[in-house]
Amino acid sequence: NAGVTQTPKFQVLKTGQSMTLQCAQDMNHNSMYWYRQDPGMGLRLIYYSASEGTTDKGEVPNGYNVSRLNKREFSLRLESAAPSQTSVYFCASSERGADQPQHFGDGTRLSIL
Amino acid sequence: AQSVTQLDSHVSVSEGTPVLLRCNYSSSYSPSLFWYVQHPNKGLQLLLKYTSAATLVKGINGFEAEFKKSETSFHLTKPSAHMSDAAEYFCVVSDPPGGSYIPTFGRGTSLIVHP
């Protein structure tokens, strides 16, 4: 009963290092999302993928890239990490459609020094 | 364009008293509306959703919300708070533009429950 699995759960990076956050879902969902959560800001959408083979920018895409590897997996890459990217990152998936709820992973806590 | 405002950043109640978390939305369509709960160090979990059926929606753990179109509100309530309800709550609105949707999240309300 895994749902959405994110790895790693915690990571500390130095400024300028690169890193890929992994996300996989086992619910056969079409749509997947990456969010960042900062205190008092709610969740802000970084990138989303409405279906396999497509990706689109969200509200805060600068400094990030994504890959929809297949229907199950959606990765988020930081090419050159900056302290402003210190945050908690959540991956989510859903069926396509405005009335479909999202299913979330437990998050990746990322600190950039 | 859609937007959502959670009117309180923090709500404090005593155990056994009612809970009210307020949410107003803006949408050009007939939106779908959701409430999610986030416990510490966990991901978000769906509490309930409204999708143009009954205006009073019942969710998990005794929570319910009422859709009021005239007031553009979707407030979350519970008759009696439990200590385990202490968490962050998010109101979310979703429009159906062009077949794919991008949900918009409120900034969250932190519910504090005192013994």
Image (cartoon, rainbow, N blue to C red):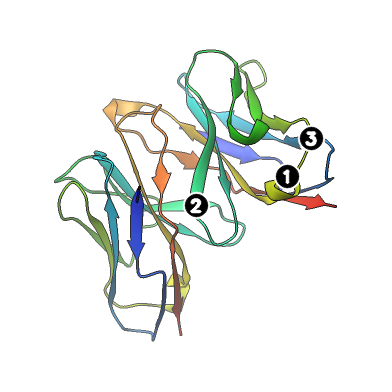
Badge 1: residue crowd in 10 Å (few <14, some 14–19, many ≥20): some
Provide the chain ID for the residue under circle 2. Answer: A
Q: Is residue B93 visible?
A: yes
Tell me the number on the disc at residue A43: 2
Left-right relation of A8 to B16: left
Left-right relation of A108 to B25: left
Q: Nearer the viewer, residue B68 or B38?
A: B38
**What amino acid type should be assigned to the residue bearing mark 3?**
Ser
> What residue is disc 3 on?
B80
Residue A9, compared with residue B11, is above or below; it is below
Q: CA distance from mark 3 to mark 1?
A: 19 Å
Q: Residue at x 69, y 49 (%)?
A: B84
* Residue B28, horizontal then vertical, whole percent: 47, 23
* Residue B107, horizontal then vertical, whole percent: 59, 48
* Residue B86, horizontal then vertical, whole percent: 70, 51
**What amino acid type should be assigned to the residue bearing mark 1?**
Asp
Q: Quadrant of residue B74?
A: top right
Q: Quadrant of residue A24?
A: bottom left
**What amino acid type should be assigned to the residue bearing mark 2?**
Leu
Residue A100, compared with residue A102, is above or below; it is above
Indicate which disc, 3 or 1, sits on the residue closer to the N terminus: 1
Q: Secondary structure at mark 1?
A: loop
Left-right relation of B62 to A82: right
Q: Is residue B74 visible?
A: no
Q: Secondary structure at mark 2?
A: strand
Q: Nearer the viewer, residue B10 or B95?
A: B10
* Residue B55, horizontal then vertical, whole percent: 59, 15
